[in-house]
Image (cartoon, helix red, strand yellow):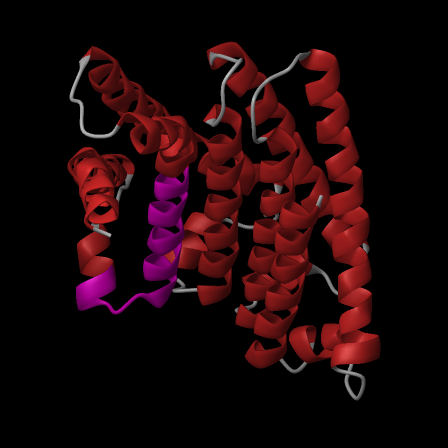
Amino acid sequence: MIDAFIDTLEIIPRGLVFVGLGLVVLVIAKLARDVITPYKIDDEIIKKNNLAVAVRLSGYFMGVMLVFLGALYQPVASIAVDGLGFDREYAEDILRVFLYSLAGIAALNLVRIFMNRLILFRFDIEKEVVEGQNVGSGAAEFGMYIATGLLIAGSVAGEGGGPDTAAAFFGMGLALLILFALFYQLTTSFDMHSEIENNNTAVGIALGGNLIAIGLVTFKAVFGDFDGWNEGVAAFITFGVIGFVLLYVMRLLLDKMLLPTVSASKAISVDRNLGVAFIESAVVISSAMILFIAV
């Protein structure tokens, strides 16, 4: 028993260094956001009680931490094996995690502009979130940030690849997210752009939840050791197709089995029912999690 306690305590100091590094990364992420944002984030959240900005910022922070955890995946595995030692390899791990996290912060801020123009392109989402305090827009961006963070995390985790493979799978993943947003629009009975622009928070939550779900599927597709382009691309396409079909089927089952007395689409678009939007999000995210573990 004592030996077990000693073995556990030996790995804690090295792990705590990464905890501290994670806090540093969050602070840098907030500073970066303050620099590139034309308005004062703290004033919007504290003085103006702007929930939309707070929701979006929460997604941004979670996306940054997902990237951090993706970069941390391999060093954590080595901590469990190597124990306490603070050697050169450990210092290189810290530097690698830090640099990948900085790259992730830059990518998340750049991708936000890119994704907003390709997913919610019919209105000015920045104006909706800041001036209109549109929580639906903030919820949609929350989902975008987490989906993008999952994508980057999956791209940088594991061994066998490098910056080139991470960038390639990241680009393919972004294309998949955009295609899924178009697919979601085509398979719903309402116009998600018009609904979100008209302050329909439920539609924004549902879209955000579906983006997180496809983000989990994409994470599964790109996660792990790189064994070659043929294997990597084949797995990516396979999981992408399965993800599209699975999430669509789960939305249909929501109407037929879980909420048989109501139309989920009508409840979300017409009644603006937040409860149904959260349930839809929970169902599709849960199904994506099952796919991640089971396959």
Q: Is residue 273 left or right of residue 46?
A: right
Percent across and percent down for residue 213 are 62, 52
Q: Residue at x 26, y 42 (%)?
A: 38
Q: Is residue 79 left or right of residue 23?
A: right
The quadrant of the rendering that contains the C terminus is top right
Depth check: 38 or 14 in front? 14
Q: Is residue 141 above or below residue 178?
A: below
Percent across and percent down for residue 267 are 69, 80
| Image quadrant where residue 97 sits | top left
Percent across and percent down for residue 191 are 72, 60
Percent across and percent down for residue 240 are 74, 37
- Residue 8 visible? The answer is yes
Q: Residue at x 25, y 14 (%)?
A: 89
Q: Is residue 243 left or right of residue 93?
A: right
- Residue 121 visible? The answer is no
Residue closest to the far bottom: 261
**Magenta stretch: residue 58 in it?**
yes
**Magenta stretch: residue 210 in it?**
no
Numbered-mark total: 0
Q: Is residue 277 above or below residue 212?
A: below
Q: Is residue 257 left or right of residue 176?
A: right
Q: Is residue 121 above or below residue 99?
A: below
Q: Residue at x 56, y 77 (%)?
A: 274
Depth check: 250 or 75 in front? 75
Q: Which residues are magenta?
A: 45-66
Q: Main secondary structure of the magenta part?
A: helix
Q: Is residue 230 above or below residue 205?
A: above
